[in-house]
Image (spheres, grey):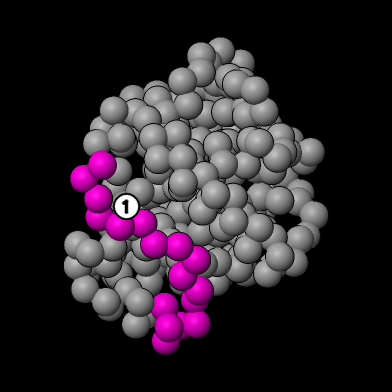
Amino acid sequence: MIISIASGKGGTGKTLVATSLALALTGEARVQLLDCDVEEPNDSIFLHLSLNHCQTVCIPTPKIDEDKCTHCGKCAEVCAYHAIAVLPKRVLVFPELCHGCGACSYFCPESAITEEGRQIGVIERGNSGNLELVQGKINVGEPMAPPVIRELKKYIDSESEVIIDVPPGTSCPVIEAVKGSDFCLLVTEPTPFGLYDLSLAVDVVRKLGIPSAVIVNRVGVGDEKVEHYCREQEIPILSKIPLDRDIAALYSQGIPLVEGMPGWRRVFAQLFLDIRENYLLRSYEVPK
Ligand code: SF4
Ligand code: SF4
């Protein structure tokens, strides 16, 4: 089963939930945790395992052969991302804007464009007992997380229980990370910001057709509007984590909740069983 852990808003406790759920299952099953928060992967801090570089992620970027180019402008015309500018005597490519879609080389009438790989990130892996962590890391300043997430998801092991730590927000990287999941846990906090971003995240998972439920973190910090919203929208709240100084202290020291407070291990294991018993499993295909 593939469970993604998402939140419309950063800093709601997504990492806390993803690492706790993964560790709680290791006693019973082989578990794979995919850290798709590629701009700032931090699950490894809590899992205390060493990571090995296993793959470089590149995207194809156009290279112009000026001897063949007639400066017709077709490549700039078809580039939806404004990554090419054709001047009277020169073609300029802006690699950081290029999405590697290949349209320019496909439409160039002179076959003056070849493609060369440009590295935008890496994939790293590490093991500890029954748990495997695979994380993507995008180069600083690179704007395009989805290609790194796509490569990362190719490492999904269908024999394992898979937990995906999704980037914050509701944009393309989130969709890339969540799609293909059997279930999505939305982590939120009971504040106006938490509620607003939760409603956006709910829209996304509904459009993707993925069943979801909510975990409310830092209960006690705000009001009850998140609970009202979930009731109205008929979204189950599967767990609540209180606003607790000891939990915050463990987190700040890089200690997983289920290790610092072992009672939570049973809570997260039960959470997994609830999801498995209440939602139909379906086979997973790695998205193209
Ligand atoms: S489409 Fe080809 S020939 Fe035309 S400007 Fe671009 S590279 Fe040059
Ligand atoms: S590969 Fe696609 S995004 Fe990149 S320059 Fe060519 S048309 Fe633009």
Characterize the local packing of mark 1: few (<14), some (14-19) or many (20 or more) Cα atoms within 10 angstroms: many
Q: Where residue 202 sits: x, y (%)? A: 46, 69
- Taking the magenta stretch, the answer to whether it contains residue 233 is yes
Residue flagged by tag 1: what amino acid is it?
A: Thr
Tell me if residue 7 comes above or below residue 124 in the rendering.
below
Tell me what residue is drawn at x 76 percent, y 61 percent.
281
According to the image, label 1 marks what residue? 12
Tell me if residue 262 comes above or below residue 134 in the rendering.
below
Seen in the image, is 215 located left or right of residue 153?
A: left
Tell me if residue 132 comes above or below residue 164 in the rendering.
above
Q: Nearer the viewer, residue 29 or 200?
A: 29
Q: Where residue 243 sits: x, y (%)? A: 25, 55
Q: Where residue 177 sits: x, y (%)? A: 54, 47
Q: Is residue 128 visible?
A: yes
Q: Which residues are magenta?
A: 230-246
Q: What is the quadrant of residue 246 in the picture?
A: top left
- Taking the magenta stretch, the answer to whether it contains residue 188 is no
Seen in the image, is 264 located left or right of residue 109?
A: left
Specify whether tag 1 is near ligand 2 (CB below 8 Å): no
Tell me what residue is drawn at x 69 percent, y 60 percent.
276
